[in-house]
Amino acid sequence: MSDRPLLMIPGPIEVSDAVRDAAGGPPPGHLAPALIEAFGASLGMLRRVWRASSDSQPFVLPGSGTSAMDSAVQNLCERGHRALLVNTGYFSDRMAEMLRRRGVTVTEVKAQPGEAPDAELVRGALASDRFDLLFATHVDTSTAVRVDAEGYARAAREHGVLSVFDGVCATAAERFEMEAWGADVYLTASQKAIGLPPGLAMLVASPRAMKAREALTVAPTMSVDWHCWLPVMRAYEERRPAYFATPATGLIRALAVGLGEILGGDDDPARAMSARFALHERGAAAFRRAWRELGLTAVPQRPALLSNTLSALYYPAGVGPELLGEIAARGVVVAGGLHPELAPRYFRVGHMGHVLTRPDAMRRGVRAIGEALAAKGAAVDVDRALAAMEEE
Ligand code: PMP
């Protein structure tokens, strides 16, 4: 990891050597026995990582997070539907646009950048009108704000409304209990906390969500249609060959490895995922202690909103986006601001997956940021920031 830039953007992320090896090499055919096994095993593991019920339906499609969002929107919604959308930033805006393109009437509960509506507010909004669906971004990557997904999902259930969560910057890192909370779709992409290169769109749909697809009068675009993919997913889970459209076969081979790493060989998914969520909590807490020592303040305005997958940090006085070049010159790649209202005022550091198993890489990230701040004239003590990472 040390002789090339360390990727600490909020996706794509660093991947383990085992995942890299599985993703590389000649692509397997989509009907090859080893591919069928990897695909079938991955679908079963998806349910465990999502903490989803045994009658829920996992889908793994070629594409990115945006394709997963399209898949959810197009399979659940059509003209005449009404959606409540909790808007916490850039990717919630994208979801709103997708819903509107599908002819859905969208009511937004919008938060200031760095804030999120609490579950009571969402419950009140759900009670104020008739809705078919609730959409929220679990962690909005533009602000690093994590919403109360449990509270929202439970409120939606109480109102008989389907709930859909964009987990692209959260799934497998932030606690999500799909079955216990009664959520209907949880979607993500391979290049974030799943720990793979980009190229796969993933989601799990509840039986209620699958029924909503049945009730549609206008079919989705074929490439994301659950009807087209369902026989393929079922066949692979039963270890039979199938075809609808060519899967990203090299990545499927890597998916079985990546999900296996997340579950850590533990056959109790509750325990395995608790350990995985705790890894992210501990890692994020160590980074936060370092940021505090470096005098950096977070975009999320309350501790409860701080995500464990990335930090969004305001530049200190006198420092601006040129800091990113200084950090890159020290071999670490972080991301600029993304929220349209704040973009030039802050930067983002991704900390999910593999990097959290590498304390040397975590320290390398903090050292590069601290030294870059010092180079820009900020009064920082990098060694103190590094020491703070160790103090639990
Ligand atoms: N939603 C969220 C929360 C994201 O962070 C991203 C990507 N950063 C997307 C959706 C879109 O995913 P992709 O870029 O893989 O299409």
Image (cartoon, grey):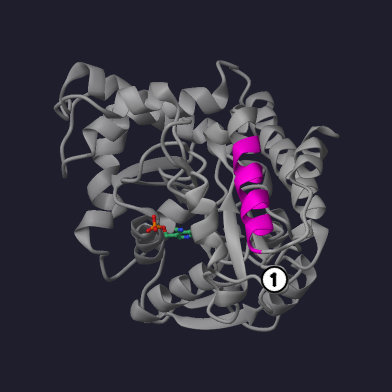
Please name the residue shown 70% across and 67% down the image.
Answer: 299
Query: Which of these two is toward me, 291 or 330?
Result: 330
Query: Which of these two is toward me, 368 or 336?
Result: 368
What is the three-letter code of the residue carrying label 1? Gly
Please name the residue shown 78% across and 44% down the image.
Answer: 385
Q: Secondary structure at mark 1?
A: loop
Range shown magenta: 363-376
Q: For residue 266: magenta?
A: no
Query: Which of these two is toward me, 137 or 229?
Result: 137
> Could you say which quadrant of the image residue 247 lies in?
top left
Q: Position of residue 97 (x, y in %)?
A: 41, 78
On the question of residue 4 being in view, the answer is yes
Whether residue 43 is situated above or below residue 185 in the rendered picture: above
Whether residue 114 is situated above or below residue 255 in the rendered picture: below
Q: Position of residue 129 (x, y in %)?
A: 64, 83
Q: Is residue 216 left or right of residue 99?
A: left
Q: Is residue 91 left or right of residue 28?
A: right
Whether residue 18 is situated above or below residue 143 in the rendered picture: above
On the question of residue 176 being in view, the answer is no
Q: State whether the magenta stretch is mostly helix, strand or loop.
A: helix
Identify the residue under disc 1: 114
What crowding class fits label 1: few (fewer than 14 Cα within 10 Å), some (14-19), or many (20 or more)?
many
Query: Ligand 1 is in which quadrant of the figure?
Result: bottom left
Please name the residue shown 69% across and 25% down the image.
Answer: 271
Image quadrant containing the C terminus:
top right
Whether residue 27 is situated above or below residue 325 in the rendered picture: above
> Could you say which quadrant of the image residue 21 lies in?
top left
Query: Which of these two is toward me, 131 or 191?
Result: 191
Q: Position of residue 86 (x, y in %)?
A: 61, 72
